[in-house]
Structure formats: structure tokens, C-alpha cells
């Protein structure tokens, strides 16, 4: 399990090299809401265009809402305005 605000793309490869039959997950979230609120299964081959490991999807009993500048929930959004973790 890797955790933090930012996981470098080079770190998972080092773990996969040391532990051949393992799965690596990235965890993160707003500390004031929960230590971990999201998870992402990190692939063995990281796409070359990635600059960091993606943030992930909400864990059970956690929700993400995409909000505009007026704090209105956006459904079917084209661009991300603000990511607000609601607990």
C-alpha cells in the first residue's frame, strides 16, 4: 500500500521488481475527513504519459462530488472544477 498526496510513477516499479507476485495500491484522501478515502490499483506497466499515480476511486461509504465555482454538483461534467470529499 502506497499513500500520500502524490505517488511518483517510479515507485511502484521498484516494488514490483522486489515482490514479483504482488499487487500495489495507491491510497489517499483528505486527512481531516478520513486517513484514506480513495484507492487505485496500480498497474505493473505505468503509461509513459503519466506524471503521477491517479488519485483513485472512493472507498466504501465515501463519496466524491465534482462541484462548480458556486458549489453546485456537476453531473456529466467535461472539466473538473473542484474536488470536494464529503463524509
Image (cartoon, helix red, strand yellow):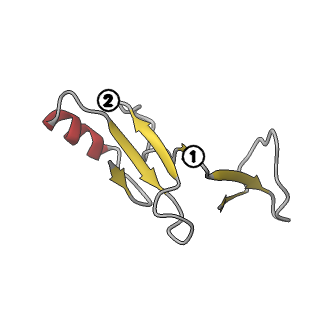
Q: Residue at label 1?
A: 60
On the image, the x and y values in percent for residue 8 come to 35, 50
Q: Is residue 65 left or right of residue 73?
A: left
Query: Which quadrant of the figure contains the C terminus?
Result: bottom right
Between marks 1 and 2 in the image, the one whose residue lies nearer the viewer: 1
Q: Residues within 10 Å of mark 1 (few under 14, many from 20)?
A: few
Residue at 41% across, 31% down: 47
82 or 64: nearer the viewer? 64
Q: Is residue 25 left or right of residue 18?
A: right
Q: Secondary structure at mark 1?
A: loop
Residue at 43% across, 45% down: 53
Give above or below for 41 relative to 58.
above
Q: Residue at label 2?
A: 44
13 or 58: nearer the viewer? 58
Give above or below for 52 relative to 43.
below
On the image, the x and y values in percent for residue 9 come to 35, 44
Residue at 37% across, 42% down: 25
Q: Which numbered marker is on residue 81?
A: none
Residue at 51% across, 59% down: 29
Q: Secondary structure at mark 2?
A: loop
Amino acid at each position: 500500500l502506497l499513500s500520500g498526496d502524490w505517488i511518483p510513477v517510479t515507485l511502484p516499479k521498484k516494488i514490483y521488481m522486489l515482490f514479483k507476485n504482488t499487487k500495489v495500491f495507491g491510497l489517499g484522501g483528505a486527512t481531516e475527513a478520513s486517513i484514506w478515502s480513495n484507492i487505485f490499483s496500480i498497474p505493473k506497466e505505468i503509461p509513459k504519459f503519466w506524471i503521477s499515480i491517479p488519485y483513485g476511486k472512493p472507498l466504501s461509504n465515501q463519496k466524491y462530488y465534482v462541484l462548480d465555482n458556486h458549489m453546485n454538483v456537476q453531473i456529466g461534467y467535461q472539466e473538473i472544477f473542484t474536488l470536494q470529499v464529503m463524509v
